Amino acid sequence: MAMRVDRRRALATLAASFGTLPLAGCDLFSQNPTVQHVLDSAESLTKHAQRLLLSRQALAREFTEADVSPQFRANGSTDPDDDAYQVLAESGFKDWRLRVDGLVERPLQLSLGDLRALPSRTQITRHDCVEGWSCIGKWTGVPLNIVLQHADLKPNAKYIVFYCADSPDQFLDASEKYYESIDLIDAFHPQTILAYDMNGAPLDMPYGAPLRVRVERQLGYKMAKYIMRIEAVESFQHIAGGHGSYWADRNYEWYAGI
Amino acid sequence: MQLRIAATDRAKRPVIIYRHSALIRLTHWVGVVCVTLLLLSGLQIFNAHPALYLGQVSDFGHPIASIGAGQKDARQIGITKIFDYSFNTTGFLGLSGPSSDDQHAFPSWLALPGYQDLAAGRRWHFFFAWLLLVDALTYLIYSIVSGHLWRNLVPSVPQLRHVGSSIRDHLRLRFPRGEEASHYNILQQLFYLVILFIVLPLLVVTGLTMSPALDAAFPFLVDALGGRQTARTIHFICALTLVCFAIIHVLMVLLSGVWNNMRSMITGWYVIKPEFHRHGDAS
């Protein structure tokens, strides 16, 4: 009888330690650099597999006016804590200029009027957030490839970097500004636009006024808001954390196709 | 009379058979690891937006199911809503403990990693999704080529007639013995086929249709599933189905001879005891 109780206690102890050990172990594992490195290998596999399946020009599904979500969730920053930006916003962004520079033959300074004078594209698309939700919105803007053709990329340009006015972590790290980058396949995709209108009206501040990019075949965090500057680069390793995007510096995938 | 039966029983020695080939055993255990880590990291991902919807988009005001924390009588409680029904799930879902860190949809002890970290959860999820795909394809190709699929998994018509009696036997915890224990019974066959050819493929397809890139490549898939948010909901339901399957599976393993079953899935060897005679057992 005593043996039985002991066995029961031993089993209970065993069960309890099985309950907690793997979990503590998993958290340690999650933070282990080697484990992280192994897990990260899935990203390039995903990117290559998706690029293989996805023709360069394949368009994201476009919807109709009736499908537009009545309530479009605004994620990340909704009111950038940046003095220069707020001054520009007060005057309706009439003094805002988009700088296009880096590996280009002709650096540009474009006002909202300049951008609106360029050919535009309107698309009603589904916005998929990394958190799991989706909304449909109507976006109007100038295709990025038109701006890049005006600026004339140098042959060694490989990525387009978007520098933004907002710092999502306004409490902890106000110095770290949002930024994103895409490769030239996405930069020259017909649906990649610099959007200035949403649902037929100029972008509201929560959605990225005065200008945000739409990269319709990737997740929402790639679609940088509050764009101040676009730079063509050969590599993004020297920028901020070196992973090519604010969220990629925080362990999210740079390629956000899933 | 009794003596004679006892004598014949003694003559019947246990037979040791080779029940699972090495590749079946390997793909089984790799699959166990993958599915476990996919589930735990999946719950971490779900915690980033713990609500499910139908259609292409999220109707934030009317999710078909959601998990969250709320107030009741000036106290924090965990609330799980399914359609119009609300359940107080304090202690498990929505609110698992007294601290603000316990305000996750699924408790931290069920999430990978335990702390809130969507980026890390995604890293684990996609890595093991790839590994599971390789594992499942290896199993599938092997099963077709070796004949395992037709020989052992697909039931014959006479076997199908035994569904009713097999359910009765399982409920009474009477498991096949003797020669019958050397192959899958009809309930096992149907269970495994549903998991292998319906639930797992549906998990993969609904997972893929949550990808904006693949939706651009194969728009018909997400439409066929009823939209991205419906696909996400189906993904979640399939994961729950898999959990139920795993619970029943482990329960059956425990009840029908845990060491014999474990030995056969680890080493391949399974002991078949001689036919059991109730009347001859009096001695």
Image (tube, coloured by chain):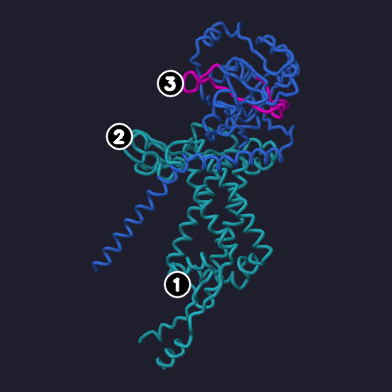
Chain colours: A blue, B cyan
Measuring from the top left, give residue B39's x and y in whole percent.
50, 47
Q: Which mark is residue A171?
A: 3
| Label 1, label 2: how far apart the Cα atoms are | 48 Å
Q: Which residue is mark 2?
A: B75
Q: Amino acid at mark 3?
A: Phe
Please, what is the dominant secondary structure of the magenta stretch? loop
- Asked if the magenta segment contains residue B59, the reply would be no
Q: Quadrant of residue B54?
A: top right
| Label 1, label 3: how far apart the Cα atoms are | 63 Å
Mark 2 vs mark 3, foreground winner is 3
What residue span does the magenta drawing correspond to?
A165-194
> Do tags 1 and 2 sit on the same chain?
yes
Q: Amino acid at mark 2?
A: Arg
- Asked if the magenta segment contains residue A187, the reply would be yes
Measuring from the top left, give residue A234's x and y in whole percent.
68, 25
Describe the element under mark 2 as helix, strand or loop: strand
Describe the element under mark 1 as helix, strand or loop: loop
Q: Quadrant of residue A249?
A: top right
Residue drawn at point x = 46 percent, y = 65 percent: B253
Q: Which residue is mark 1?
A: B174
| A141 to A185, vertically: above or below | above
